[in-house]
Amino acid sequence: MNISSSEAEEALAVIQAMMTRTRRAISSSGAFIFMIVWGVVWLLGFLSSQFLSQEIANNVWMILDILGGILSVVLGIRMNRGIRSTATTTSGKRIAFFWLLVFVYCVAAVAIAWPSDGKQLAMFIILFVMVGWAAMGLLLSFASVWPGLIITVLALVGYFLLPGIFYLLMAILGGGGMIALGLYIRSRW
Amino acid sequence: MTQLNETIHQPVRLRIMAALVTLGPGEEVDFSTLRNLLEVTDGNLGAHLRKLEEAGYIAVNKIFVERKPHTYVSGTATGRKVFHEHVAALQSILKSK
């Protein structure tokens, strides 16, 4: 079988495009929806912390977290990547166990340190979630490490330098950033 | 120098193999997901999958999930090897230009 160099070039371009398309379909399908869900939770939760009394904001956060958790579980169950794998199932269980550990360590750290105000509590949670995000990024997709690092830096800057608008900053840049990133992944991947 | 593989070089089969080698080891893709990725009809995809299966390049796994039949497709070790050889042959044609 003989083909010209232009045909060979065309075939290689077709292969490359198909591999990229498949990789994106596998890795991105559905993942963006979790970013949007938790972006909305952060946006509404931090806005309530900024503008409502602490008692009401705590209740808003509790309701949002429960709704976000239920929605994540439902979406996770309904999400069909169209891929079956024994290896994926194993790593999926390990990822779930890892997040469970992050949650337990976060609760333990909060119980020991017992933060005196809402901003400290928010920073504890943000830092633990972002450590988990970074670990997932390093294991699964290095490019996804950066948004997590940016949110961490923004949170630290807000906490230490702009305490008066810390919640507002986290609502717009943290929550809004996650929503924007989720929409970007959906449209570009 | 490795030779081009006529079975794989057909455009749809080339794209099928490219999609399947992108999956991780032990992973298999649902027939409808593969059809959507390739943007081909059920009949067209089925015909090309049969050719590749006969050549031993892919494995077709038919199972029932919640009483519904599902067809999953994966690349075999032979298929992956042959595909990489085909890509190498294409690259060598470009280099010798």
Image (cartoon, coloured by chain):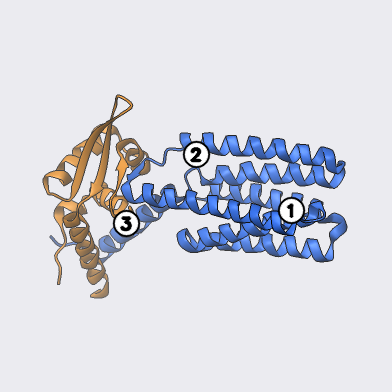
Chain colours: A blue, B orange
Mark 1 crowdedness (10 Å alpha carbons): few <14, some 14-19, many ≥20: some
SS for callout 2: helix
Do the numbered discs 3 and 2 sit on residues whose CB atoms are within 8 Å? no
* Residue at image mark 3: A15
Q: Position of residue A85 (x, y in %)?
A: 32, 46
The amino acid type of the residue labelled 1 equals Ala
Percent position of residue A18, x then y: 35, 52
Q: Residue at x 16, y 40 (%)?
A: B50
Residue topped by disc 2: A76
Left or right: residue B95 versus residue B55 is right
- The residue at the point 57 percent across, 58 percent down is A132
Q: Amino acid at mark 3?
A: Ile
Residue tagged by mark 1?
Answer: A122
Chain of the residue where label 1 is placed in the rendered structure: A
Residue B48 appears in the rendering? no
Q: Earlier in the sequence, mark 1 or mark 2?
A: 2
Q: Is residue A69 above or below residue A138?
A: above
Q: Measure how far apart labels 3 and 1 are at the Cα level.
A: 47 Å
